[in-house]
Image (tube, grey):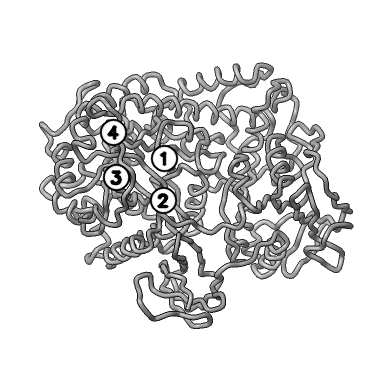
Amino acid sequence: MGGRRQQRRAPEGRARIRSDGLELEGVVTPLHSAGFPYWELAPGRWAEAVDGLCALGIPALRLDLPWALHERAPGVFEWGARRPELDVERLLGLAAARGLRVLCRPGPWIPRAPGCDGIPERLATRGATGPHPPSCASEELLHEGRAWLRFVASRLERFVHPDGPVAVWIAAGPGPVPSPFGAGLLDRSDASLSVYARFVKVKYPPASTPVGLPPPGGPVSAGDLERSCAWIEAGEAAQRAAIEAQLELRPRTAGREALATLAAIPDSPIASGGDAEATRFSVDAVTLLFPDAPMDFRDLRLLGLRADGLGSVAGIANVPSSETLLEPAASLDPPTAAAVLAMSGTRALDLDTLIPRSAFAEFGAPLDRFGSAARGSGAAWRELFRSLAAIDHSALTRRSDLLLLANRELCRVREACSGPSPAARLGSREDLLIRLAPRELDLRDTPSRDHAASFLALFDGLRRAGIAFSVADTSVSAHRLRAERAVALVCFEHISRPLAKRLFEWVAEGGTLIIGPRLPSSDWMEAPLLLPPAPGRPAERKRGPARLRFGELVLEEVDLFETGDPVLEHAAGMLATAHAYGRGRIVQFGFRLPWGAAECDEASLTRILTALAHAAGIGSSYLASDPAVETEFFVGAERRFMFLANPTPQDRVVTVALGAGEAIREVRGAGEHLRAGEPLEIAGCSVLLRELVQL
C-alpha cells in the first residue's frame, strides 16, 4: 500500500515527527498527507476515495474535524448517528484497514471549513463584510472550545496509536493573528480591543495612546507603530495560550502519551515563519498556516524558504487553494506547486491545500479533479511522489551559501520595544514622530506582500545570479546565525540594538556580512548606536552623487568609499568595498537598490550581486542558461540532486552549468546522462528532478 512506501527503521518509542518524517513503531515514513473532506463526499464513495489516495502513494490522511459541522446545540455534538456523512469513526476504520495513518486537526479554527472557519457562527464576530472568526482573546470561545476538544478527545481515544490509525494531533490557535494595519483579518471585537488595551497598559506604562482602530494607511507616528506592535504581541500570546490548552486535552491511550504533536502556527504579519515562540511548545514540529491570498511561483518558493528557516518546521499548510493558484497568470498545476515547495526544503506536503476544495465533492474523490477527466495531472502527482521517494527528499539538505534577511522595520521596532528600560521604548513620548521617510519604513507594502521591494529585488537577483541562499528576517536568532557563513541585509541608518548586537558579534566571530547602503548609526530612538568593539579597519567614505547610472540601473543615495578592498568600482569611485571586522568581514555597498530592480535591468543587478557575493567567498552553483528557469541543489549522504523549475507557460530548452566530469540523469535512470552544454527541455509550468553524477 501507499502507506508503506519509503520506510526506514528508527528506535522504538511513541509516535513523533522528525525532520525526515513520521516515526511510528520504529519506522519513519515521509510526512506526505492529503486532507479528506468527508462532509462533501457521499459516504458510499469514501472507500473509493481512500483507495485513490493509496494508489498515489499517500501514507497519511489529514482529518479536519469542523466544530461547526458537528455541533447540534451548545455542548451537544453529532458523530454520525443521524447524518451518515459525519460518521468519522467509520472513516477511521477505512483508513486503518488500508494501513493509512491519520493526522487529526480538531480546530477550533480551521480555515475554509464549514461555519465560520470551523467555528459555530453563533460565536462569530459580525462586521461590515459578514461574520468572521471571533477574537483570539475571547474567553467565551476558549471556554466553549474546550468542551468541543474534550468531546473529540473522548471519541478518538480508542483510535489512537497503537490501537488505531490516529498518530498525530494538530493543535491550533483559535484564529489568525490580527493584522496591524486594518486590512484582512484584523480583529476589531470588544474582547480583542480589551485585551490589547490591558496589554499596552502593562507593557508600556508611560504610554497614553488609546486603543482603537488603526489608521487605514499604516502607521504614521510612534504611537501608531507602538499600538500595532502591541496588538500583534497580544494576539500571539493568546494563540500560544490556546495551543497550550489544546495540548492538555489531547486523547491518550492506556494512560500514556501516544500521539505525535504538531502545532499549527498562523504566519505572523511581522515575523517570517510565524511566531518564533512557537518552538517552546511541547510539540514534535510546527507547521505554518498562511492566510488566503493569490499565489504565484515566486510566492510559493518564498514560503518554502521561510518555512525551511525554522528548525522545527515540518511543512506548510493552507497554501491558498483558490482558483487564483491555477489561473493563467500563475499557471501552476498542483504537482508543480508541491514540487516548488519541496525544492525549497519543506519537509511535509499537505496536498489538498493545493487543490480547490470545491472540486472534491464534484468528482467524488480527492485528486480525481486532476486525473483523466481533466489535464492528466493525476499521473504527474504519481510521478512526483515516485521521484520524491526515489531520492529520499526528506533526508536531503538544501545547499545554502548565503542567508538573506528580510529587514522589515516593524520587526526591528518590535525588538526595540522589548528592551529592559520602559522609558527608552518607542512610543513613550507622544510627540515623537517617526523621522524616517515612508520609503524607509516600507509602508508602500501591502499586508499580502509584506516584504520591501528592495528585498524582493535581492531575492530575484540572487536567484538569477545562481547564488544558493535561504531566507529569514531580522528576528533571526544568534543560534541560527552561527550556522551561516554569510548574511545579506538591506539596511538603513536605524537598527534595533538587539539586532546590531547579534549581527556584529557574529561577524566578529568570523561571519561575513553583506550590507548597504551604510552601516547603522542610530537606534529607533535616534540615540547613537555604537557597534560592538572589534579589531579591524573601518572603511572611510564620502558622499557621492544623488543618482548614478550603473549599466541600465539608476542607483540612488550613493556613497563612495575611500578605503577598503575594492569590490565594485565605477568611474566616480568605489561603490562597494570589503574590510575586516574582528575575525570576520564586512562587504559594504554604498547605494540603495532601486525599487523593482529585478524588472529594470536584470543583467546589471546580477553583476552587482555577483561581485558582492564573490567578495564574501560565494560563487554561483548549477545555473541554467535561461534565467527564467530556476535550480536548487540538494545533498544527501551519498547522492546529489537538482530541481529545475520552469514557472513560465512556455516550454524552455536550457543547458546547465556543471563541474568537470559531472552529468545529470533521470532520478531512477540507469543511463542517458546529460553533460554540460547538452540541451534539456523543460515543459512550461513544470518541475524536473535530476540526479547529479560523476562520470
The nearer-to-camera label among 4 and 2 is 4
Which disc, if any, is residue 258? 4
Where does label 1 land, which residue? 285
Give amino acid for label 3: Gly
Res. 175 image quadrant: top left
Q: Quadrant of the N terminus?
A: bottom left
Image x and y of residue 97, in percent? 14, 46
Considering only order in the chain, which callout, 2 or 4, is on the residue closer to the N terminus?
4
Considering only order in the chain, which callout, 2 or 3, is on the residue closer to the N terminus?
3
Q: In the structure shown, which secondary structural element does the residue marked by tag 1 occupy?
A: strand
Residue most toward the front? Answer: 11
Where does label 3 land, which residue? 26
Q: In the structure shown, which secondary structural element does the residue marked by tag 3 occupy?
A: loop
Give amino acid for label 4: Ala
Give amino acid for label 1: Ala
Which disc, if any, is residue 347? 2
- Determine crowd level at label 2: few under 14, some 14-19, many 20+ residues with C-alpha closer than 10 A: many
